[in-house]
Image (cartoon, rainbow, N blue to C red):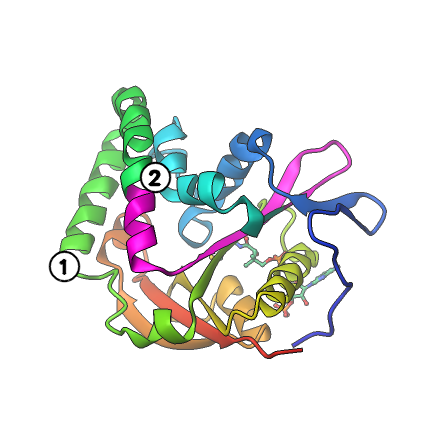
Amino acid sequence: MPAALFKINPGEALLLEKRKQIRKFRSSDREQVTRIFIDNAFAGEGLADYFPRFGFLAWAMMGRYFIFRRDFFWVAQDEKDQVIGFICGDTEHFCLNLLKIFLLAPVIAFWFILDAPFITRRGWDLLGGFFWSLIRGEFNFNSREIPRDYPAHLHINIAPGLQQKGLGSELMEIFLQELEKRSIKGVHLRLYDGDDEGQAYRFFKKFSFKEVTRKEASFMSRVSEEKKFLITMVRKIERG
Ligand SMILES: CC(C)(COP(=O)(O)OP(=O)(O)OC[C@H]1O[C@@H](n2cnc3c(N)ncnc32)[C@H](O)[C@@H]1OP(=O)(O)O)[C@@H](O)C(=O)NCCC(=O)NCCS
């Protein structure tokens, strides 16, 4: 675990190097955050060929954080105020999660109606595979202990081309500091990876995350040539 790069004051923009800034998410960041998410979706496999218009996917995958968890959402921006990376998360609470899905449903449905005519054949195929994986239980944790012992979860994405420059580490440091400050005892995340340890897997291991579950994600074979797995990784948060 690398030493903390800096201490943060909540909500305050931080100057990183000379040009980059990390700050809290704003509504106006939604489009740029979505672009990075789509370009990186499913461990670096971009989704633009599947969903040429992103509204539906963005709200289905990110709406929960856009609306309910801005306090848990940071973006990195460059000198032109372009968002170049983000980290966001939430804490697992079954009833609250259901309520969020219920409240978000009309927004997601609205975007689905707008986007459906533009979804490509491959996109429909992927969506079909996704629901098939869902029915087969491929997304289940298979454990009640993970949300109990590691109640927070996170998503992190850095714009392709700007990865491997230390930005992800800086965002991760901020996120982990915030968890510590809120006395949240642990965090989990889920990522797609092949048999070999990919870049993201190694990144999380560097931050002391350990793998606890690995299940084949059959729908991912529609996006990628190699066999992919949905992996759950966890990390305890030490009190400072
Ligand atoms: C995984 C991910 C978040 C990591 O962020 P990142 O900004 O690329 O990570 P960092 O640059 O901080 O660290 C990655 C590597 O770059 C190295 N690095 C850090 N600063 C560097 C610099 N200035 N110059 C060169 N290398 C550097 C780090 O040491 C690290 O190397 P290591 O793998 O040998 O330990 C990012 O690559 C990403 O978004 N990937 C695609 C999406 C994804 O898979 N997300 C995870 C699913 S939730």
Q: Can residue 196 be seen in this view?
A: no
In percent of width and height, residue 160 lies at: 58, 46
Position of 216 relative to 12 (above/below): below
Res. 44 mark = none
Q: Earlier in the sequence, mark 1 or mark 2?
A: 2
Question: Which amino acid type corresponds to the residue marked 1 in the rendered image?
Answer: Arg
Q: Which mark is residue 60?
A: 2
Q: Where is residue 111 in the image (x, y as percent from the top left)?
A: 33, 26
Q: Who is closer to the viewer here, 218 or 63?
A: 63
- Look at the numbered disc 1 and give the secondary structure of its residue: loop
In this view, which residue lies farthest toward the right? 18
Q: In this view, does 164 lie to the left or right of 229?
A: right
Is 89 situated left or right of 218 in this image?
right
| Quarter occupied by residue 171 | bottom right
- Determine which quarter of the picture holds residue 177: bottom right
Name above or below for residue 239 compared with residue 157.
below
In the image, residue 155 sits, relative to residue 199, either above or below, namely above
> Is residue 127 visible in this depiction of the protein?
yes
Residue drawn where x is 62% and y is 78% of the image = 239
> Is residue 30 covered in magenta?
no
What residue is at 40 percent from the left and 76 percent from the top? 149
x, y percentage for residue 116? 26, 25
Residue that mark 1 sits on: 136
Q: How far apart are marks 1 and 2 (CA)?
A: 20 Å
Residue span colored magenta: 75-101
